[in-house]
Image (spheres, rainbow, N blue to C red):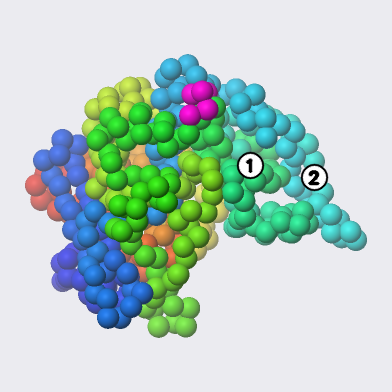
Amino acid sequence: MSSLEDTFEKACRQRQIPGAVLSAVDRNGKFRYEKVFGSRSLKSPESNEPLEMDAMMWFASCTKLMTCISVLQCLERGLLSLDADVTDILPELKGIEILSGFDTETGKPITKKTTRSITLRHLLTHSSGLGYDIFDPGLQEWRVSQGQKPGEGKTIAAKYSCPLLYDPGTSWAYSPAIDWAGKMVERVNDNISLQDYMKTHVWGPLGIKDMTFRLRERPDLVKRLADLSVRDPSGSGEVRYIDDPGFRDAVDDDLGGGGAFASAPEYLKVLQSILANDGKLLKSESVDKLFEPNLTEESKQALMKLLENEELNNMLGGTPLGTAKDWSLGGLLIQEDLPGWKKHNTLTWGGLPNLTWFIDREVGLCGLYASQVIPPGDPKSIELSGIFERAIYEKYKGVTPRI
């Protein structure tokens, strides 16, 4: 049976992935695993520059956890409310309607009014009715009807101002809602940028230096940036370099839903702080909120229905099909024990280039699989991430027999 390290060395050698940083730590820091494999870039066959532990990566939707932490800090200080109408702070969303279809003759969109207000709880749990236009055909058609292209825009308002997909709180769709929540953090803190807020309240308390929303302002970090790779569509199974500089400086706003660049060791500090409940970021009762289910029954059923599709399931966490799930104020919640693996109420999520993280309070372990491979939900990456996580649980079991 191949070891974890042998498996990843082989995967990189065969170009199943370009490289990966694997890291895990327990609650008190006595158990720690950190390994790096493969190359920083596949741009040139002659270049065999190894991926380093401190390589910078686009962390994409891994950013969401830090924004949710920022929101909870604002809740602690009485600056925000979970269940109030958000449009007092986000007037851009006032009067937003639900897309119900398109006129068969004119092609014009048909919308209807909402019956409920959007709340911060809806935003944090992706049950607001908002959706990503790059993933939803209806929103893509709406963009075209407005003379726009899906995914375009230099600000949150320009990029993510689309009609709703459903009445708030009645269904579920992965969305840019956390970007809007990040905008709320900015506005209730005297319009400070989200980057400056996190420098003071999230990164600073943990001693994090290698993290930014604005890569263009950190040439020292650009030098360590791992390139993106894409799975070869021809069926070879290999990955190849893709020139996609757009993801580096695509917008002017700090995107709380997907804009951060970081190194794996720095991001692991965030995960361990929440796992340890060390008080550096949040009060104990706020940490508890990150591990509590928050979906209505309607929204939970909609989430589980989506996850019946294997491709979507891979994109939304990659756990075994049929695994019971919910959503907390910080990410996806596993709602059952997975034998030899994650326990009930494990918090998990990831980022578009196939990064995944988890925090398992019952076992006392957190971990991160960090890579830069597209498309999201890449089956080989999901497979390797699962191999890593299961192996880490086994390694930890070896030094901590109680799990």
Q: Is any part of residue 173 visible from this angle?
A: no
**Looking at the rendering, in which quadrant would you find the N terminus?**
bottom left
Q: Where 122 falls versus 144 (above or below)? A: above
Mark 2 lies on a secondary structure that is: strand
Look at label 1 and name its amino acid.
Ala
The magenta segment: 188-192
Residue at left 57%, top 24%? Answer: 83
**Where is mark 2, residue-wise?**
111
Residue furthest left as drawn:
399
Say the numbered circle drawn on residue 194: none
Residue at left 54%, top 34%? Answer: 183
Q: Quadrant of residue 334?
A: top left
**Where is mark 1, residue-wise?**
157
Look at label 2 and name its amino acid.
Thr
Q: Is any part of residue 403 visible from this angle?
A: yes
Q: Where 362 falls versus 132 (above or below)? A: above
Residue at left 32%, top 69%? Answer: 41
Mark 1 lies on a secondary structure that is: helix
